[in-house]
Image (tube, rainbow, N blue to C red):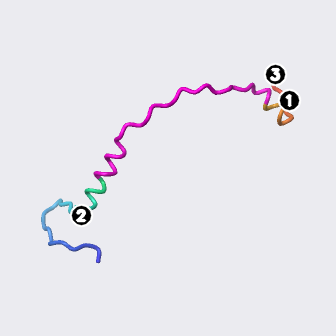
Amino acid sequence: MVARHERCWDTPQTLTDPAHARAAAAMRAIRLQPVAAPVDTEVEQRSLADYDALLGVEGVA
């Protein structure tokens, strides 16, 4: 069975299962929660020459 409800002759008409509406509302609430701010972290920046040496590639002048 795909659906069980009284026939609705109105146009346009959308019938929504209340359980589906509750699930959609819960998913929207989760999606709209604030996201934690990114952490400012120091990251080493290596020279591209280091990678060239590691791979045995000569640097481009």
42 displayed left or right of 14: right
Identify which residue, 17 or 40, lies in the foreground.
40
Magenta-drawn stretch contains 44: yes
Q: Position of residue 61 (x, y in %)?
A: 81, 21
| Residue 58, above or below 32 | above
**Residue placed under numbered mark 1 in the picture:** 58
Asked if residue 8 lies left or right of residue 30, the reply is left
Identified at 83% across, 36% down, the residue is 55
Find residue 13 and report its horizontal and vertical position in percent. Answer: 18, 60
Q: Of the two numbered discs 2 and 1 on the same chain, state the one appearing first in sequence.
A: 2
Real-space Cα separation, disc 1 to disc 3, in angstroms: 9 Å
Residue 16 pos. (x, y %): 23, 61
- The residue indicated by pointer 2 is 17
| Gap in angstroms between the C-alphas marked 2 and 1 | 65 Å
Left or right for 38, reference 42: left
For the point 31% across and 46% down, which residue is it?
A: 29
Question: Tag 3, which secondary structure?
Answer: loop
At a point 29% along the width and 78% down the height, the residue shown is 1
Name the amino acid type tagged 1.
Answer: Glu
Residue at image point 13% right, 63% down: 10
In the image: residue 59, left or right of residue 9: right
Q: Find the magenta span and give its range.
A: 25-50
- Between the C-alphas of marks 3 and 2, the distance is 66 Å
Name the residue nearer the viewer: 5 or 27. Answer: 27
Vertical placement of residue 4 versus 16, above or below: below
Please identify the dominant SS of the magenta region. Answer: loop
Which sits in the foreground, 9 or 31? Answer: 31
Q: Amino acid at mark 3?
A: Ala
Q: How many marks?
A: 3
Which residue has dot 3 on it? Answer: 61
